[in-house]
Amino acid sequence: MAKQHVNEVVEELKALASVDLFKAGRDADRFVGRPFHFDYSTVKVLVNDKWKRTVGGIPAGAFLLAAYDGEADVAEMVLLRVTGPTSLPTDSEVVASMVEYYKEGVDMSPGPTGGPGPALDSYTRYEFMFSGLECRVLGTFFRDTNGRTLFGADVENFYSAHNYGVYKPQGKVLEFLVNFREGEGVPGGSGQFRLGEVRYSASRRFASGPSVPVYVSAFDFIGKRTALFGMTRTGKSNTVKKLVEATVHISERGKDSMGQPLAPVGQIIFDVNGEYANANQQDEGTAIFELYGEITDRYSILEKPGFAVMRLNFFRELTSGQDMLSSFLAAQTAGYVQAFLSIDLTEPPADDHSAHTRWSRVAGAYQACLAAAGFDPGAHRIRFEGHQLINGLAGGIDPSAGITVDQAIQWFTAVWQNYATHPFFTTYAQQHGHEWADEDLKAALAFLTRQTTPGRSATVLGFRLLMPIRQYHTQAGTSFERDILELLRNGRLVIVDLSQGDPAIQRTYSDRICRVIFQDAMHQFIENKAANYIQFYFEEAHNLFPKRDDADLTQIYNRLAKEGAKLRIGLVYATQEVSSISANVLKNTQNWFISHLNNRDELKEVSKYYDFEDFVDSLRTAADRGFVRMKTYSNAFIVPVQIDRFLAKGDGA
């Protein structure tokens, strides 16, 4: 963010601190009516057309202030939100009179009528102007004994409804309300960042006055869980970019909300569509890396200029490589394939000689399958314990001395070709009570030779199924996940471009990176070591996160949601499918940004949280890009906001 813009924000927030809500909120020009019903949760207000016109209309979702006029100098204002119309006791009489008026003077002869009928008399016009509004009580602003303005999310006491006047806030008063921070008193605390402006409705005929800026505290998002829900092209990605921008600003500032030193915040974006890592043709100049190139590192699944490549050494990372194979081959239902993917490649303790010997053979056969599929082993050699008689079947190859992958293929192929007939294998079973090859080894040998039965013809695809996956293999011995972790610990911004992978690949890479970071954060926590914050950003989260009915708390995303706060891990996820997200993630989400959703089921899911049910109708109908209903950690109520556009080539406003 440009220094000039930061200074403007600071000055604006300082000006807000001087607003006397209890005086400025009683502006007679903003009067809209008086309550005729008042309780702890609902207020019904009598309004008329003249007052509505004077204040520029009263849209659904608008904030109103109910001021207590029963005592002089009472510093208390009840904050209301308009939820819809309500009936008046006189409505039936008004409707009857209105119908009679419509009927009077109607020309029933053929052809055009003679006009709207007789003019209304003053008394009738006066009666017709009145209507009722129903409002939700959001809480109470009050001044304590120390002169501080505070907010409580309820009503401690209320008097007879006629004691209150209701006003529609605007300008600095409205700005004060929507930027009030729970626990901070007046707005203007550390880490404030402009996110957008107040917007009540899609129709904006009356919105010709000065805009009312909305600020967020970046500390609401650091280490917290944030959800962005909305249809495609409704501004979710733009909001994510604004949050990234706010976090970079806080990171550069180097102080937390209490003014204490703050280590640089690491941020990682899992870019499913490639719009953060690459220049975006649809929204020119809005790629994150264009603004933050000096602190950004980009990773890709495949070779691309300017990107580090995320590849795995399948010969070194046996279990991780097998996980990736399982993702690729998830659609393969053949028994021999499932047996191969179920091989236990976890290395047992070296002092368990028998178990380690069996494991080394299985690992060697697994690596032989990789080599047969064309995975380049480089200088990698395979070592395991053979037997003199078996070595003779393979032309004298001794694997205990270390052999090449080609020799391993030859050795294991010879074993499987002779497994059913050679005396060594048949007598071994008789002498030991179990076969020489356990089930894992037999699964690997069948996959290598493409023979489900030893010594028979090759009848299955076997290792050939692995050939398309070899492009994700590297000879390098370093782990890209550890490299990414180091960058994040140094406060870098990492963008992982997953746009060139199918959903299985996207999940595999995302899971691997998340697990490494989570494990490191857990280690830091257990060791009581200070660690910087790391922020995760997930686009199209429904492709990665566990499903709604998935109660497996070992899922990495469930663990990030439930345990991330104590580990200084923040989670920002965006999707149009609210109902697809695990309940464990949703229940632990503190910040909500909801834009247009066209599905009643999705809206029903959203309405379960806070008081988003007040916005269900407008969320279904208003599809304006960037028009969201926002609830953040330090705000006690939902604010309707038009999010500013992220400008990579601008000043960050």
Image (cartoon, rainbow, N blue to C red):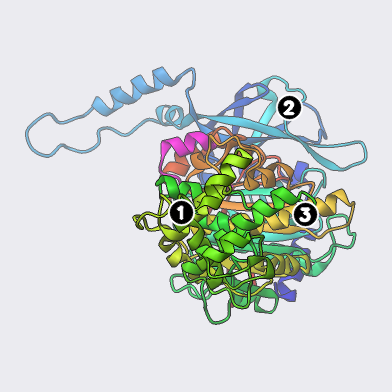
Residue lying farthest to the left in this orientation: 110
Question: For the residue labelled by badge 2, is the local secondary structure a helix, a strand or a loop?
Answer: loop
User: Tag 3 or tag 2, which sits nearer the N-term?
Assistant: 2
Measured in 3D between alpha carbons, the distance from the residue under mark 1 to the one under mark 2, in whole angstroms, is 73 Å
User: Tag 2 or tag 1, which sits nearer the N-term?
Assistant: 2
Q: Residue at x 45, y 27 (%)?
A: 127
Asked if labels 2 and 1 touch by Cβ distance under 8 angstroms, the answer is no
**Quadrant into which the C terminus falls:** bottom right
Q: At which x and y percent is residue 569?
A: 73, 53
Q: At which x and y percent is residue 452?
A: 41, 50
Q: Which residue type does callout 2 highlight?
A: Val
**Quadrant into which the N terminus falls:** bottom right
Q: Is residue 260 above or below residue 440?
A: below
Q: Is residue 156 above or below residue 424?
A: above
Instruction: Give the residue pinned by disc 2.
Output: 155
546 or 463, nearer to the observer: 463
Magenta stretch, residue numbers: 593-606
Q: Which residue type does callout 1 highlight?
A: Ala
Q: At which x and y percent is residue 270?
A: 58, 61
Instruction: Give the residue pinned by disc 3.
Output: 350
Q: Is residue 96 above or below residue 575?
A: above
Does 219 sit left or right of 649 as displayed?
A: right
Q: Which residue type does callout 3 highlight?
A: Ala
Does 244 sit left or right of 236 as displayed?
A: right
Does 218 sit left or right of 464 as displayed?
A: right
On the question of residue 277 being in view, the answer is no
Residue 603 counted in the magenta span: yes
The residue mark sitting in front, 1 or 2, is 1
User: Tag 1 or tag 3, which sits nearer the N-term?
Assistant: 3
**Dot 3: few (<14), some (14–19), or many (≥20) neighbours within 10 Å?**
few
Measured in 3D between alpha carbons, the distance from the residue under mark 2 to the one under mark 3, in whole angstroms, is 67 Å
